Each structure stands twice: as C-alpha cells, then as structure tokens.
Amino acid sequence: VEVERIRGRAHDKLMNKLAAARHKAEEKRAEAEAKRNRQAAKTEQQAEFIRRTGRIPSSFSCWSWCS
C-alpha cells in the first residue's frame, strides 16, 4: 500500500514536470512565431518603401545582416 502511494506521487510529480515542459515549449514556439511575424511585417514595410520611392533606405544596409 505504501509503495503504491509513493509510486502514485512520483507519477504525479513526473506528469506535472512534463506538463510544465510542454507549456514552456509552447510559449517559446509562440514567441518564435510572433518574432517571425514581426520580421515579416518589417520586411514588407521595407519592400513597400523601396517600391514606392525606388531607393533603398539608409537603415537597410548589408551590415545589419552580413555580420
């Protein structure tokens, strides 16, 4: 009886740990997706500026993504 209780507690503890890890992974996944969306929006704005004006903005340089 005592062994079953200990085993049950250990199982519950493991399940809680796994759930916390899943939750943390989901948060990181959501943050990565949000970051991708922000970057895509920024790139779209830069492309629109280039289309509209016909010139590359000064902030858009090779150094920002070459280094």
Image (tube, rainbow, N blue to C red):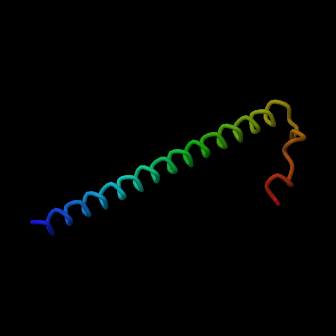
For the residue pair 32 and 21, the one nearer the viewer reads as 21
Count the marks: how many? 0
Give the residue displayed 87% in from the left and 39% down from the top. 57
Image quarter hosting the N terminus: bottom left
The extreme top residue here reads 52
Q: Is residue 13 left or right of residue 66?
A: left
- Residue 43 x %, y %: 71, 41
Up/down of 31 relative to 63, above or below: above
Q: Is residue 34 left or right of residue 39?
A: left
Q: Quadrant of residue 49?
A: top right
- Residue 54 x %, y %: 86, 35
Image quarter hosting the C terminus: bottom right
- Residue 20 x %, y %: 40, 52
For the residue pair 6 and 65, the one nearer the viewer reads as 6
For the residue pair 29 and 63, the one nearer the viewer reads as 29
Give the residue displayed 46% in from the left and 51% down from the top. 24
Q: Is residue 46 left or right of residue 55?
A: left
Give the residue displayed 42% in from the left and 56% down from the top. 21
